[in-house]
Each structure stands twice: as C-alpha cells, then as structure tokens.
C-alpha cells in the first residue's frame, strides 16, 4: 500500500525517525498535495512491495508518543530506493577509470586565428593584378 511507503519515507526523513501522529498527518497532507511527481514516485516504490504491512513486519513502532521507523524499516526503504527509474545508480568508479581519454571536439566554434574575408574593403595595393594575356 502506497500510504505505508509514504509513512516510512516521512518517518525516515526525521532525524530521530520519530513523529507524533499529528505531525505525521500534517506531513502526509503536504506531500499529498505536492503534485503528481510525488504520487508517481511513491506508487513506483509501493509496487515493489505489494503486500507491505509496516506494523506487522516490524518496520514502524507505535506508542503513546508517536510512531518510529525501525532500523529494519530504514533498510527496507534503502532497498526500495536503491534502483528506481528516477534514481538510477551512477556508473562504477572502476569503469570510469578504465575508459580511455577522449579527444576534445569543438562544434560550432569559430577560432580567432581563422582568416575571415573583409567586407566592403578595397583590394590593397600589395595585391598584384595579373596583366591580361593577350596574344601579341
């Protein structure tokens, strides 16, 4: 159930991992009105654990002071978020080190030392004109 994944995420976002029931309800209300991205992300995470019951599995504890995420709950959340469509893992460092250095290719850049034709300029005196070759 996606609400249970949302509760895990909210509790894990608190430094202590604890929240009062009122605080939890407030956070859920804010996140539920935050847009389609949040709903889609939670739905994707929840689809990976369709039979989730955060209380009977020991992921969240309840007492008179509020709710608390357990270390097992944090671990479950880490596993759920390890590989999703919106947070793919980065390339391994070893693979990046093995790659050969690429050459720099500059596209669409004009270099300052390139020769550009002058516009509206008279030919200079240093340019020789060929005499016309007429038969003599």
Image (tube, grey):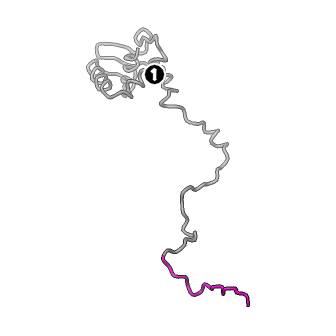
For the C terminus, the image quarter is bottom right
Name the spot of residue 67 as percent of width and height, x first: 34, 17
Q: Which residue is mark 1?
A: 44
What residue do we see at 66% from left, 87% from top?
Answer: 131
Element marked by disc 1: helix
Residue 130 part of the magenta segment: yes
Q: Which residue is the extreme one toward the right? A: 136
Residue 39, compared with residue 64, is above or below; it is below
What residue do we see at 44% from left, 12% from top?
Answer: 52
With 134 as the anchor, is 33 left or right in this view?
left
Magenta range is: 120-136
Residue 94 or residue 85, whichever sits in front = 85
Residue 91, compared with residue 105, is above or below; it is above
With 85 as the anchor, is 1 left or right in this view?
left
For the N terminus, the image quarter is top left
Residue 86 or residue 62, whichever sits in front = 86
Main secondary structure type of the part rendered in magenta: loop
With 4 as the anchor, is 64 left or right in this view?
left
Name the spot of residue 25 as percent of width and height, x first: 28, 20
What residue do we see at 49% from left, 31% from top?
Answer: 87
Q: Which residue is the extreme one toward the bottom? A: 136
Name the spot of residue 77 as percent of width and height, x first: 46, 22
Q: Which residue is the extreme one toward the front? A: 136
Quadrant of the image occupied by residue 18: top left
Residue 73, compared with residue 51, is above or below; it is below
- Would you call the spot at circle 1 few (<14 residues within 10 Å), some (14-19), or many (20 or more)? some
With 29 as the anchor, is 2 left or right in this view?
right
User: Exactly how many numbered labels are in the figure?
Assistant: 1
Quadrant of the image occupied by residue 74: top left
What residue do we see at 32% from left, 26% from top?
Answer: 31
Residue 90 part of the magenta segment: no
């Amino acid at each position: 159930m996606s609400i249970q994944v949302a509760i895990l995420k909210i509790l894990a976002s608190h430094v202590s991992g604890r929240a009062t029931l009122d605080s939890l309800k407030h956070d859920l209300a804010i996140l539920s009105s935050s847009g389609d991205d949040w709903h889609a992300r939670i739905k994707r995470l929840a689809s990976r654990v369709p039979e989730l019951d955060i209380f009977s599995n020991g992921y969240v504890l309840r007492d008179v002071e509020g709710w608390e995420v357990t270390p097992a709950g944090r671990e479950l959340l880490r596993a759920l978020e390890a590989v999703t469509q919106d947070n793919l893992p980065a390339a391994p460092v070893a693979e990046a080190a093995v790659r050969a250095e690429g050459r720099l290719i500059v596209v669409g850049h004009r270099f300052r030392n390139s020769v550009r034709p002058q516009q509206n300029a008279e030919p200079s005196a240093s340019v020789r004109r060929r005499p016309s070759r007429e038969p003599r």
